[in-house]
Amino acid sequence: MRLSNRKKVPVYNFFNILLLMILSGGCIGFIVDKMRFDILDEKSYILIIIPAILLIINYLYGRQIFEYDSEGEALHFRNRNIIPFIDKPLNDEFPKYKLIKFEMVSILFFSRLYLTVSSKNGGSAILKYETSYLTRKEVNDLKTSLNKVINANKEKRHQE
């Protein structure tokens, strides 16, 4: 199964540009108000604070692009931001038999996928991916696919 929200990049770019334009307009409005008009008094800081908070929330919301591919004998996960210098992109590929379990954690608007994968030294590693920008249907499809892989792994271990 393949899952990707790459087609939504123009929407995310538009939203980021809109937030930056609102912030720059707020900065200009703040400067003009302080230097020339002084209408808003202390409320003029709102022109900078609210757009800055929105940008911070957008940054904390996580990486926008999530790609998943389970075709073949390997699982491939990619998670990246549309602005390349903000976050380091995640790119992991491992055999299906190494997947032990997964957990989807959703808190308010934030959503993350935690994968537990067996490692070479006999232990396990936890991989984290941000899935906040996936739709409910995409999340359900992802859960279904990962459950199939885990169930297949359990059957193979049970047979051996």
Image (cartoon, rainbow, N blue to C red):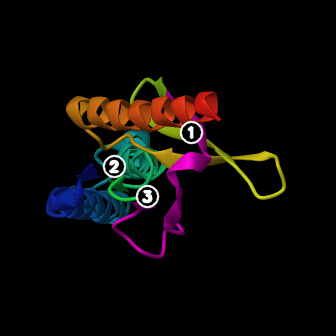
Distance between the Cα atoms at labels 3 and 1?
Answer: 20 Å
Label 2 vs label 1, nearer the camera: 1
Q: CA distance from mark 2 to mark 3?
A: 53 Å
**Residue at the spot of label 1:** 114
Horizontal and vertical percent position of residue 53? 43, 45
Badge 1 density bin: few <14, some 14–19, many ≥20, Cα 10 Å: some
Q: Which residues are magenta?
A: 77-104
Pointer 2: what residue? 47
Q: Nearer the viewer, residue 105 or 116?
A: 116
Q: Quadrant of the C terminus?
A: top right
Secondary element at image label 1: strand
In the rendered structure, the answer to whether residue 41 lies left or right of residue 21 reads right
Cα separation, mark 2 vs mark 1, equals 38 Å
> What kind of residue is marked 2?
Leu
For marks 2 and 3 on the same chain, the one whose residue lies earlier in the sequence: 2
Q: Residue at x 77, y 58 (%)?
A: 120
Measured from the top left, where is residue 111 in percent x and y?
A: 44, 34
Label 3 secondary element: loop
Disc marking residue 73:
3
Q: Which mark sits nearer the N-terminus, 3 or 1?
A: 3
Q: How many marks?
A: 3
Of residues 156 and 123, the one nearer the viewer is: 156
Front tag of 2 and 3: 3
* Residue lying at the far bottom of the rendered structure: 85
Dot placed on the residue nearer the N-terminal end, 2 or 1: 2
- Where residue 121 sits in the image (x, y, percent)? 84, 56
